[in-house]
């Protein structure tokens, strides 16, 4: 299980929960101030160990995503084909460039390109909204995909190794990535549909029953 990313997520949720005391733009500003302060303090005092882990600049990517989320949900993002295309293509170009000439900083090499790509797609008009409903299904299953993909990667790696295919080579690497994307999506969706959804419904039913006891129990 990719536990290090879950640690960052839990820390973010804790900070975000504290910002619920505010609303609107103040929530975003307080969240940004908290995340930036943590990173700056970690850099100034050269924190190591756990403190160094949680003050890594990678946490700023949460802020990037929060800014996009705020702008999108508040209606401040207007659909603009040209701008959306430019942002998306710019993000892809920066990411490809960083693959060959990495700076060693994950925020620059991955965070900024990802932010531009996501922001760009948010700006694109919904040309194929009805035809791309399967993307919404993948979004619903994203957490199951996230938790299960590491096992799929390991399985396919063993299959490729036994077949004598080097996943680090250009040709085999692209084939390996293609099958990973397809299989991770399928396995994650199956787990979401038959496991996560099942237990979510059961828990919701249990909570509803707990909140509304039978009438005979209240007489």
Image (cartoon, helix red, strand yellow):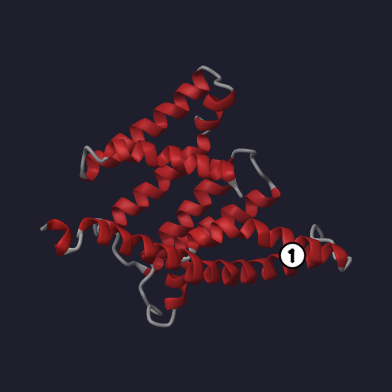
In the displayed image of the protein, which residue is found farthest to the bottom? 131
Which residue: 28% across, 38% down? 19
Residue at image coords 66%, 44%: 102
Quadrant into which the C terminus falls: bottom left
Relative depth, front residue between 58 and 150: 150
Q: Is residue 59 left or right of residue 158?
A: left
Q: Is residue 123 above or below residue 11?
A: below
- Where does the image place residue 54, in percent across and percent down from the top left? 51, 31
Residue 26 point in image, percent of width and height: 23, 39
Q: Point out residue 88 in the picture as x, y percentages from the top left corner.
A: 48, 61
* 108 sits left or right of 81 in the view: right
- Residue 56 is left or right of residue 12, and the answer is right
Q: Quarter of the image holding residue 163? A: bottom right
Give the residue displayed 30% in from the left and 53% down from the top: 71
How crowded is the residue under tag 1: few (<14 C-alpha within 10 Å), some, or many (20+)?
some
Q: In the rendered view, tell whether residue 201 sits above or below residue 147.
A: below
Q: In the rendered image, which residue does mark 1 sit on?
A: 156
Asked whether the viewer can see residue 21, the reply is yes
Of 41 and 53, nearer the camera is 53
Q: Is residue 85 visible?
A: no
**Residue drawn at 80 percent across, 57 percent down:** 168
Dot 1 falls on a residue whose secondary structure is helix
**30 is higher (above) or lower (below) than 192:** above
The residue furthest left is 219
Q: Tell me the quarter of the picture where residue 180 sits.
A: bottom right
Tell me where residue 128 sits by quadrant. Answer: bottom left
Quick one: which residue is furthest to the right in this view?
164
């Amino acid at each position: 299980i990719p536990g290090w990313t879950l640690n960052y997520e839990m820390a973010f949720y804790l900070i975000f929960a504290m910002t619920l005391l505010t609303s609107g733009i103040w929530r975003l500003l307080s969240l940004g101030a908290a995340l930036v302060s943590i990173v700056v303090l970690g850099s100034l005092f050269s924190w190591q160990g756990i403190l160094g882990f949680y003050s890594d600049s990678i946490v700023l990517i949460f802020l990037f995503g929060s800014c996009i989320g705020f702008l999108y949900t508040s209606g401040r993002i207007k659909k603009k084909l040209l701008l959306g295309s430019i942002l998306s293509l710019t993000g892809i170009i920066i990411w490809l460039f960083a693959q060959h000439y990495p700076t060693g900083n994950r925020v620059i090499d991955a965070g900024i390109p990802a932010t531009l790509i996501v922001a760009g797609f948010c700006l694109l008009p919904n040309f194929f909204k009805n035809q791309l409903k399967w993307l919404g299904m993948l979004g619903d299953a994203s957490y199951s995909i996230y938790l299960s993909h590491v096992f799929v990667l390991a399985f396919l790696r063993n299959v490729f190794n036994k077949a004598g295919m080097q996943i680090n080579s250009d040709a085999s690497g692209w084939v390996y990535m293609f099958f990973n994307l397809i299989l991770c999506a399928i396995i994650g969706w199956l787990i979401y549909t038959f496991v996560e959804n099942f237990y979510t419904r059961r828990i919701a039913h249990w909570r509803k029953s707990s909140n509304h006891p039978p009438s005979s129990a209240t007489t």
